[in-house]
Amino acid sequence: MEIQHIMQVVDASFVARQSIEKSLREIDRRALNAMVLVKRHGNTLAGYGVVAQAFRERAANLKESASHLQETIAPLIQAHMRILQHQRFVASFSAIAQAMAQYGQICASLENIRTRWRDTIAREEVEARKILLRLIATVDVLQEGIEEQEYVVTNGRIEAALAEDTGAPLMRVSRDMGEAVRTVSNAIRTYRHQLESLAYESSTDI
Amino acid sequence: MDMDILQDYLPEARELLEKAQENTLRLEADPGNDEILASVFRAFHTLKGGAGFLEAEHLVSWTHHLEDLLDKLRSHTLTLSANMIDAILKGLDVIDDMLQQLGHGDNPTPGPRDLGLLIQQLAAGQAPRPQDASAETGAFGMDATRCPPAEATLLASRRTTVDGHHGVYVERNDTGSRSAPDGNDEISEAEFEAVLDTLYGNQAPGLTDAPESSCLAGDEISPEEFERVLDQLYGGQAPGHAAPEPATQAQPARTADAPASPVRLPIQNLNAQAVLPATPVPVANSTASARAQNIPEAADTTLRVDALRLDAVMNQVGELVLLRNRLASAVSSLGEENEDMARIAREVDLTVNDLQSTVMRLRMQPCKRLFQQLPRVVRDASRQLGKEVKLDIVGEEVEIDKTVVDALSGPMTHLIRNSLDHGIELPEVRQAGGKSREATIRVAAIHLGDKVRIEVSDDGCGIDRQFVTQKAMDKGVITQEQAARLSEQEALELIFRPGFSTKDQATDLSGRGVGMDVVRETVRKLRGRLDIQTRLGLSTSIAMEFPLTMAVLPVLYLRLRREIYALPISSIDSLLDIQEHRIHRMGGRSVYRVDDTLVTPMVDLGALLHERPLRLGSEPMEGVLTERGLFMVSEVLGNEDSVVKPIDFLAERNWYQGATISGKGQVVLILDPGTLIGRVLEQATVARTLPTQRGAA
């Protein structure tokens, strides 16, 4: 794995985290807006109130999931940095072995150390892959949460249509909610693609 | 005085009084309506009966005279005149005062002697004294004394009624309409007075103030008799009377046989009508019978409860709401670990919501209670001012919290009087301006989600902003610099400033600069919103919006750095993400461009409450858009139904509506958005004025 590739993942993680946080804040604000609207209309929009409440609760769950995402990114980066470091060691030992070979000298213990570092790197890569898969699983949870949110938004649209005669701008609120969910969904999907590329294209196994 | 009877009597008496006033005003428009006459008569009759139990002699005496007058009107012995309507309405005011005295536990003092005499004179068919005679021409051109002695005859005879009571019957025969059966029976009015003197000495009703001792003796009725009267009125379902007496149902039918026109003056018991109605109420039969059929159901389902008990229940529900919030907060912090707890919390939430809305409905009262005084106010003030005004009332059935209804009575009167005095033009002026002579004042109650909007509008001359601003400067309410920078709306709102009036001389209707200030303060205390719209020369509309209930206040919690505050949800439009490119400076004020159509003042709560502005970019910041401005806060946390606790220890003018306890158990101050915006605008105006003054110096 190259350092550039790691940096790309770091950048993608940062952007994704920013985007998800911002979108989740937006989702929370939309949900609160909906709840304010419902409260201002008394009991007539009670049905939509349940939807808005569910929307907000799920937004809070998404926030919680997103925080787990951040918890997993750091170990992944750390693992890959360590692999890079250890690859550098192996490269150094290889360079020393080549230099000695020029002088017709062979150091068995050096080769032994190099082999041990390669084994270590292989183990670390397995570990890093586990972390990456865990991260992808976390992203999967986020995506599931987003799908649930989309389901809530659809319910909200139905409730909004039913309460159309109240004159409350529920369709607009539902549309705003939908847009906020779509934004976070896109951010997560993009991030997942980047993680998958890391998992399946940059592995030393390939 | 029996306090138990008093507690039952007072609310019923007030209802009767309100109904009587409403009906008296209806009579003015429809003087020939016997049903209304009978209804007013019955009101006085019932008032008198109850007052007798309480030994409120003067109230008994007063209601007796009014009842006497109504009895004669009802039996067509006298004809209704505008003067009589005036006297009845004034008499109602006196009874109202007496009821208030009773409410304070005092025995009512005698009513005004002049008015008492006038009512007695009117009841006796005599012309009022000269000073009253000028007012005798009624709206419908009738005269209470239209039968002078020369044109009418009075026949007096002593008879026994069907129920065995003795009474003197005096019949009036109009010469033009009916000839007397025997010329020897014709007596002059003086002779009639002499007959009365013979019968009563100096105690005849209509001659003197009712003497306490004799009147009391005459008016005293036994509890059994009073119960019978109530049974007649309520069909055996009188409040507080559990066991109906079947025999009482026959009473009205029996009295229906009594002669309709004679004026009955019972000898032994002046108040015999209290036991048995002297004359039947034929015109009210349809209503009365319909009511009699409905009353048993109504009585079974209606219960009169002391308002204090309701308040206590509401307070307890308020505490329950706070506990519910705390439970919900505690359970949510458990996460998904305990599904059972979460389910229980949700069910508690639903149950408390139901309980809260049920108890809330207990306190709701129709706006009719608030509006019913207005026809009288319009009538009296329009007469006094010589203006022709029609009052339209819309939405009487809209319900609102009892606190609002109680508190708005005064402000509504102020608004109507103000409209009459300042807004409505004289008929000639209106005509000259191409308007109808008769102006219209419209009072409307409209249900808007969690609010009720009460509007008072008129089609008068509107408000001249420049004139208002000039007056405000003349009276020292604002300076010239401040006036120069006022927006149109701000100029209009000057009319709500204390001490402001466009009149130089105060009258008994307006001019002291108090009324509109009272309106504004009352609206503020009721957590309402005041809005004024005017079109010069055409109309003015003042609208007040109040929360549907005062008991529970939905709030939005927000964080300002480390502190948490609350804003009433009723004042919030939406929540925004603050974007720097939308912030502008305009006229020395920070404004926010919400979209292409809305630019609103910004209120930095950090600057206002912490004296340290929030810094966009380096601190988290969110916007709460209200009807009058955008509040900048650190973070919006969430909403909750809260119970407001007053904070009496703060200065009268502060920017808090009260305090509440959040679901996490924290005491949170509830901000008053109107006051905060006002303060920001004031500060901006001062800040702009100071450099100008420095420059001038």
Image (cartoon, helix red, strand yellow):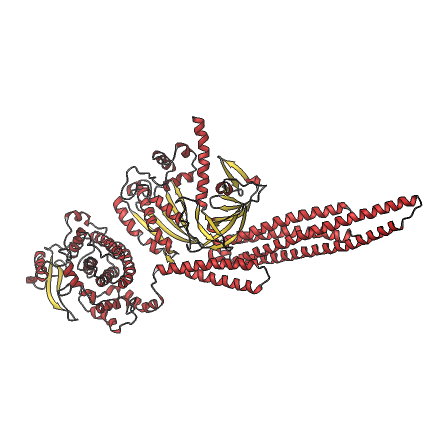
Identify which residue is drawn at 26% across, 72% down: B245
Q: Position of residue A188 (x, y in %)?
A: 66, 52
Quadrant where the N terminus of chain B lies?
bottom left
Q: In the current view of this chain or complex, which residue is farthest to the right?
A: A104
Residue B657 horizontal/vertical position (percent) = 43, 48
**Based on the displayed image, in which of its 4 quarters is residue B472 positioned?**
top left
Relative vertical location of residue A83 with respect to residue B288 in this rendering, above or below: above
Q: Quadrant of residue B69?
A: bottom left
Residue located farthest toward the bottom when viewing the structure as drawn: B246
* Number of on-image labels: 0
The residue lying toward the viewer, choosing from B539 and B352, is B352
What is the x, y in percent for residue B166? Answer: 13, 68
Q: Residue furthest left?
A: B184
Quadrant for the C terminus of chain B in the image? top left
Could one spot residue B276 in this view of the protein?
A: no
Q: Between residues B324 and B432, which one lies in front from this camera angle?
A: B324
Above-or-below relation of B663 to B612: below
Pinpoint residue B670: horizontal percent, then vertical percent: 46, 49
Is B102 positioned to the left or the right of B342 in the image? Answer: left
Evaluate whether residue B510 shows in this view: yes
Q: Residue at x 80, y 48 (%)?
A: A87
